[in-house]
Amino acid sequence: MLSESYGAKMKFLNCLINGMSLGSIYAIIALGYTMVYGIAKMLNFAHGDVIMVGAYVCFYAVSVFNLPPLVGIAIAVVLCTALGITIERLAYKPLRSAPSLAVLITAIGVSYFLQNAAQLIWSSNPKFFPEIFVFNGKNGIALFDGGLNISYTAIVTIITCIIIMIVLTLFTNKTRMGKAMRACSEDKGAAQLMGINVDSTISLTFAIGSGLAAIAGMLLCSAYPTLVPTTGSMPGIKAFTAAVFGGIGSIPGALLGGILLGVLEMMAKTYISMKISDAVVFSILIVVLLVKPAGLLGKRINEKV
């Protein structure tokens, strides 16, 4: 009886840690959605495909050119940042005053363009991301006589998420550009009258979100090594769900929503069924939004009509 109870506790802890690791990836991706929506008031559904581009760049840098993982990540961040700025300038900036539906259709078009371009450049054959978080020949640590196994990928992912959240919070609260972002989020017209360059601020937001997407792509493929041109699609959708869950437009909300979504998904896979885990997660989201439509940390905004 005691051994069964012990095994159940270890199973729960393993599930919790794996869920927090997956949720940390969702949280990093969700930041891209929540920052762009918070400032530009648009949903960038091409964000998941920027994740895919970052993962491919990191894969080729590490596997083909034999560069150190940190160098590969740096290259992926630079290229994805440039890609994010380019997408914003070419696809979204001309639609600044367009209806929301036009922007949404454009975002979907950019998403399909990136997926098909990836198939032409890298082919549709699956590639397998190398294991990069290996120390002293081991890929993790075992505790409690092997009952609890924590991979180095999970440790690095959670720590990376916490660091990114702290740095981004300090950036938005303490720096000049961060305050400009917050001003644009509140009222673009008033911010422009105060001398803030709204276009540059929005471009910077896309740059930060796309750079984070590259990091998320590398972490995602480290945890789930199979890499295909649609790698970022489903994680992107789930991360968007996490952003809505936590309160889209809120940086702490992206963290909370991502972690909760990852833990709920892993619990559903472990204790209910792998096949219906996504349905369980989205059902819980619907219930939460029925009770609190703005999300867990979102603020209800009253608009004059």
Image (cartoon, rainbow, N blue to C red):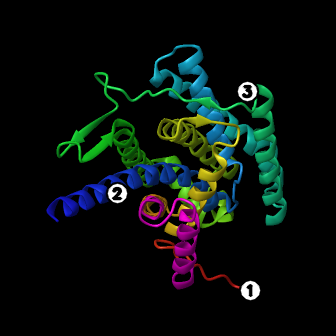
* First to last magenta residue range: 265-293
Whether pointer 2 and pointer 3 mark residues with C-beta atoms closer than 8 Å, the reply is no
- Residue farthest front in this picture: 1
Q: x, y (%) of residue 167? A: 40, 46
Residue linked to disc 1: 305
Q: Give above or below for 272 relative to 10.
A: below
In the orientation shown, which residue stands out farthest toward the left? 2
Amino acid type at image mark 1:
Val
The 10 Å Cα crowd at callout 1, few under 14, some 14 to 19, many 20 or more, is few
> Residue 53: which quarter of the image?
top right
Q: Main secondary structure of the magenta part?
A: helix
Q: Is disc 2 placed on a helix, strand or loop? A: helix
User: Measured from the top left, where is residue 222 in percent x and y?
Assistant: 48, 35
Residue 186 sits in quarter: bottom right
Tell me if mark 2 has few (under 14), some (14-19) or many (20+) residues whose alpha carbon lies within 10 angstroms of its own. Answer: some
Mark closer to the observer (3, 1): 3
Q: Residue at x 26, y 47 (%)?
A: 148
| 147 horizontally vs 116: left or right | left
The image quadrant where one finds the N terminus is bottom left
Q: Which mark is residue 16?
A: 2
Q: Residue 122 got which mark?
A: 3
The disc, 1 or 2, on the residue closer to the chain's N-terminal end is: 2
- What kind of residue is marked 3? Trp
Left or right: where 151 falls relative to 68: left
Residue 205, how many percent across, how many down?
Answer: 60, 48
Whether residue 184 appears in this view of the structure is no
Disc 2 residue type? Leu
In space, the residues marked 1 and 2 are separated at their CA atoms by: 45 Å
Depth check, front residue: 94 or 278: 278
C-alpha distance separating marks 3 and 1 = 49 Å
Pointer 1 and pointer 2: residues touching (CB < 8 Å)?
A: no
